[in-house]
Amino acid sequence: MKFINTLKNIWKIEELKNRILVTLGLLLVYRFGAQVVLPGIDASQLANLATQTDGGLLGLLNAFTGGAFSNASVFALGIMPYISASIVVQLMGIAVPYLQKLQKEGESGRRRINQITRWLTIAITLVQGPGYIYNLFATLPSSAFLLGSTVTFVASSVIILTTGTIFAMWLGEKITDKGIGNGISLLIMVGIIATLPQAFIQEFASRVFESNGGLIMILIELVIWFVIILASVMLVMAVRQIPVQYARRTATGGYEKNVFGSRQYIPLKLNASGVMPIIFAQAIMFIPAAVAGLSQSETAQGVTAAFSDIFGFWYNLVFALLIIIFTYFYTAITVPTNKMADDLKRSGGFIPGIRPGTETAEFLDRIMSQITLPGSVFLALIAVFPAIIVSLLGVQAGWALFFGGTSLLIMVGVAIDTMQQVNSYLLNRHYDGLMKTGKNRKAVA
């Protein structure tokens, strides 16, 4: 009843209700587009493409697009080109002075960076589009192409794929602006969740109808799944609180000697880099198999096989090491300890026992290094857990992807972010949040 009352409170807030409805409507449009097959392709002959994306790196990409990749859909490339463009622009912001200048210009600079990201998204899609089309030529029978493998078909399909990515990007931005939550992240999460029922049904059929462990194995897998989700929530929410003391100001604007204000805290996240290290590492893992595939030698074929099996030992060992390295790298460029120390000094704050300025920056940097190590190891462990669950329990590939990796962390992170936004609306209207009771709170005068 308390949960139902909370839902009623959500529905009472007109702005929040409208934002939720807009979000659901735009997500429905995105899922509908994922089922629309490219013009000129026989939808009844896509079985080979579905088989190709059953596991492996293409299976992971298919999960991110919600099955649009295996459907030869107009949204086949999904929002991933935009994610790639965002990563490239973010990394270039470290070394390119022009982008560094834009980052300091506030809202106008942010709009300009967004425009650069959009143009780079189009460029990446124009490169990936022909690759996807020629993969269709290699995978599907010739009879599946109603217009044949003509230049007209290739050009029109690339234009449609590019338009589909741009439209998906526009949907994500509209959700962020008019809806609730981060639109781009929600599109990815909805795509991942769309493949969850089918993956679970296949695993259930394998266990029960093929006498491969029965219902007891399904129960064990669900318990492990919920434990991993709990661990992922702890990883996303965990923070190290650094105590900060502020000198109390006098009426004339100075500081009273030896008189201090209330103690506050700087929350340093255990996993400040989020899922970005996994995304970086995942992108790098495509390279060895692609390079080795250019050679026909026995060694090259072995490398291709090793780095194409996302549940193999060598793939996951290298994957885990890259995640740890990229976690340190991304944390170093996204957590500006020097700027934090300068802002703290200008506002009259200090960490007890630590001198303001350089010593504070060094202290914060040391703390970040200490908490990043267990955070990166924990992140790497969750990322490779699908391979562990496959080797230990023989879980099917599609269902195993939901036991860790980017898929699970994205779902957990986006769900927490969306709940926090809903909570802020409830608390601002004097209601308790989603994690509290549904009773009305008294308005504060």
Image (spheres, grey):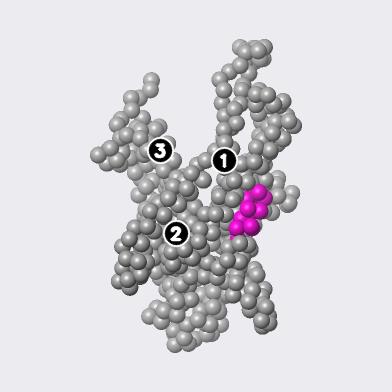
User: Is residue 260 in view?
Assistant: yes
Q: Pick whichever of labels 3 and 2 is earlier in the sequence.
A: 2
Give the camera-side residue of 384 and 216.
216
Stretch in magenta: 319-330
Q: Give coordinates of residue 321: x percent, y percent.
A: 64, 57
Q: Is residue 342 magenta?
A: no
**Left or right: 103 with respect to 199?**
right
What is the magenta segment's predominant secondary structure? Answer: helix
Residue carrying label 2: 402
Q: Pick whichever of labels 3 and 1 is earlier in the sequence.
A: 1
Q: Which mark is residue 423?
A: 3
Disc 3/disc 1 C-alpha distance (Å): 21 Å
Tell me the amino acid under the disc marked 2: Phe
> Which corner quadrant of the image does residue 335 belong to?
top right
Check disc 2: other Cα within 10 Å, few if <14, some if 14-19, many if 20+: many
Residue carrying label 1: 269
Q: Pick whichever of labels 2 and 1 is earlier in the sequence.
A: 1
**Left or right: 19 with respect to 346?**
left
Q: Give coordinates of residue 84: x percent, y percent.
A: 59, 60
